[in-house]
Amino acid sequence: MTSHAFDQAIALELQSDGSFAGHTSAAYANMVGPYGGISAAQMLNAVLLHPQRLGDPISLTINFAAALAHGPFVIQARAARTNRSTQHWIIEVLQGGETVLTGTAFTALRRETWGVDEEAMPLCPPPEQMPHGLGPVPMEWIKRYEMRPISGAIPQAWDGSGDHSLTQLWMRDNPPRPLDFASLTALSDVFFPRVFIRRATLVPIGTVTMTVYFHADTAQLQASGNGYILGQARAQAFRNGYFDQTAQLWNEAGVMLATTHQVVYYKN
């Protein structure tokens, strides 16, 4: 473990029964409970650290069943099925003996095949040309990331004037840290709820489920180093108290690293 706040936040200790003990991080606190991206990274890390793991992550789904309180928690991760080159995982986070988060993961041994990035990275100004920061925000976790918005930043006035949900921004860990599967997972959730952008109105929200698809292999993550990641997010539909939002993440070389999709509850 390094001294970086991210590595400290996702640190887990293997227990005698095969579970992992962890603790929430004040550095990644959200308005209520921890930042969802760090919880997802902690759950993925239980798979990454598991002595039975086969291959690298291909997908991860996290279901936020209840609010995670500040304090210790236990992660149980088990391989539900292992094939020759693929593995299916079931993950559960417990706090006070009760389930608060559930999840699944799929890992595999990748092999060389034909490939193409069907969705190319959009043309955007380089990160050095974009202003740093999002203005005054109360959440502690935002300080853990360097964000340089290109479009669709958090509204400066909550006046109901929003007309789209698209956001594009450059981002990376703060201070910079070499990219890996756990940090890419957390970065996949940095986008503010799309209803805030679309309506320029603050309403109660909460992510219900989140999936990350990892398109990059270990070598491509290592090649990304601690450089910037271009993220693009938008919603598809807002209806009857729920909306979805999808996002894509590319490194500075234009390689698509991950795509993500989540469903969010909202009021009003």
Image: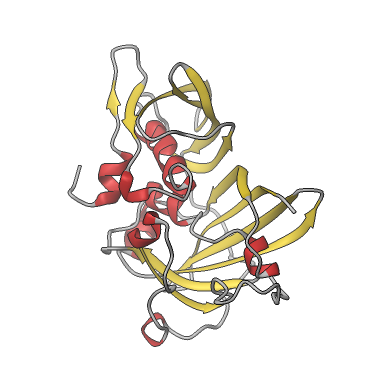
Q: Is 116 situated left or right of 98 in this image?
A: right
Does residue 112 sit above or below 10 in this rendering?
below
Quarter holding residue 64: top right
**Residue 89 visible to the viewer:** no
**Residue 76 placement (x, y as % from top left):** 43, 22
* Residue 65 vertical position relative to residue 161 in the rendered view, above or below: above
Residue, x 35% and y 31% (percent of image)?
71
Residue 106: horizontal and vertical position, in percent? Answer: 53, 36
Residue drawn 48% across the image and 22% down it? 79
**In this image, 106 relative to 3: left or right?**
right
- Image coordinates of residue 120 in percent, x first then y, are 59, 73
Vertical side of 76 occupied by 158: above or below: below
| Of the pair 222 and 90, the residue shown nearer to us | 90
Q: The C terminus appears in which quarter of the rendering?
A: bottom right
Q: Which of 143 and 7 is in front in this view?
A: 143
User: Which residue lies at the image location 63% right of the left edge and 50% below the top edge?
Assistant: 205
Q: Quadrant of the N terminus?
A: top left
Up-down relation of residue 18 to residue 249 (above or below): above
Residue projecting furthest to the right? 240
> Residue 32: image x %, image y %?
48, 45
User: What colouring does the structure picture have?
Assistant: secondary structure
